[in-house]
Amino acid sequence: MNLKSEVFLSVVAYSLCSGTLVLLNKLTLHHLPYPSLVVSFQLLAALIFIYGAKHTGRLQVDALEWQYVLPYLFYILLFSVGVFCNMKSLSMSNVETVIVFRALSPCIVAFLDVLFLGREYPSLQSWTGLSLIALGAYGYASFDAQFQTQGLAAYAWPGLYLFIISLEMAYGKRIIQSVNLKTLSGPVLYTNLLGLPPMLMFAAMGHEYRSFVYDHMVEQKPVGGVAVSLLLLGCAAGTGIGYAGWWCRGNVSATSFTLIGVINKCLTILLNVMIWDQHAPPKGILSLALCLVGGSIYRQSPLRNNTLKTSSSVAVDDGDDKNGRDDSDSVATDAEDINEQVELLEAEKGMKRRS
């Protein structure tokens, strides 16, 4: 498989897994309104899959080593702080505000790509694409009345969330240079295993254990076969997005991967408007379309010449090694979908305000 085909397939696989997971989690949370517990179950299911496949000889997995745990611990710390900032942002403002700030993250990651990851500055065409995405996100949010009436204090937490998630994206690309995992399952194992305790902690902070016990033991509400089926399908999609996310981030720059996440978010909102009984104004839909246009004209920045010369494992084009991975590959991103689920619940409320 040539490089262009692999890049295309990895982006498609990640986007499909991401969209499928968001849809499944939307349906799951309708039956089981415990977002942190749902994600924790998905992380646990991925770990069961990895170790099950390893012990049956169907999958090779990197061993857990302390020298590799430390870099991933810092990544998980960034992820956990990002989730906390996201939740505080949604409590202080609304999902539209968070979407605007999230859409600005590729611009910051583009600079981090240059400073720390050996990339060239984006071209004028690429900066135009990034600007259109930010403008489209602002246009979408500006049609919400609550967004228009918020004070400056409402933007402190979204601003911190923007900084943390940008740093998380860049650091995720950086750590692989010092963490030489040999298999695709290695980073999926590390991120799911280390990401599980924070998710359980967020469930406790959100009183989800108490709610679950009250709903299903005191009130004796049945879980139901539909909820269980959706939960299991979500586990399969969650495991898939871990591998697809690793594959995708191994073939694109940190900025490109961040951009893909923003575009996926816009597509999710657009599909949410079209499929469910929630309607954004035409100008809001046009704003989302502007985001997609911006994403289509963006072009990934190449590696600098001195970076290519000093890295013997980097290919001339985009740094692929013998396994098809970028020398500055990143970690799996399935745990990050807790942000998507919290925002999705708030987005549904926002759509109802517009209707």
Image: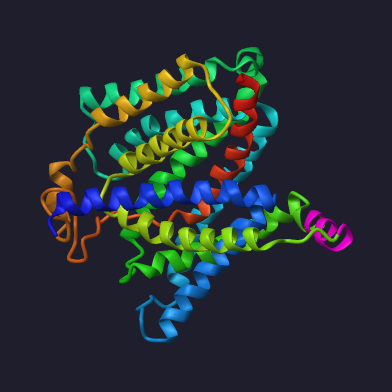
Is residue 61 something one can see in this rendering?
A: yes
Query: Residue 212 at what x, y percent from top left?
Result: 78, 58
Q: Is residue 274 left or right of residue 132?
A: right
Q: Residue at x 45, y 42 (%)?
A: 167
Rendered view: 133 above or below 251: above
Whether 114 is drawn above or below 212: the answer is above
At 21% from the left and 22% from the top, the residue drawn is: 124
- Residue 193 place in picture, x, y as percent: 53, 67
Q: Indicate the position of residue 73 as horizontal and vertical percent values.
A: 52, 60
Residue placed at 81% from the left, 60% from the top? 216
The residue stretch that appears in magenta = 211-219
Q: Residue 339 appears in which quarter of the rendering?
A: top right
Could you tell whether 230 is left or right of 179 in the image? right
Task: From the top left corner, tell me how far across and down residue 332 is, in percent.
Answer: 42, 57
Membership of 155 in magenta stretch: no
Quarter where residue 253 is shown? top left
**Relative to residue 121, is residue 196 depicted above or below?**
below
Question: Is residue 249 visible from the viewing direction of this image?
Answer: no
Of residues 116 and 124, which is closer to you in this image?
124
Q: Main secondary structure of the magenta part?
A: helix
Q: Is residue 226 left or right of residue 22?
A: right
Q: Quadrant of the C terminus?
A: top right
Q: Nearer the viewer, residue 66 or 282?
A: 282
Image point (67%, 60%), residue name: 200
Looking at the picture, the colour scheme in use is rainbow
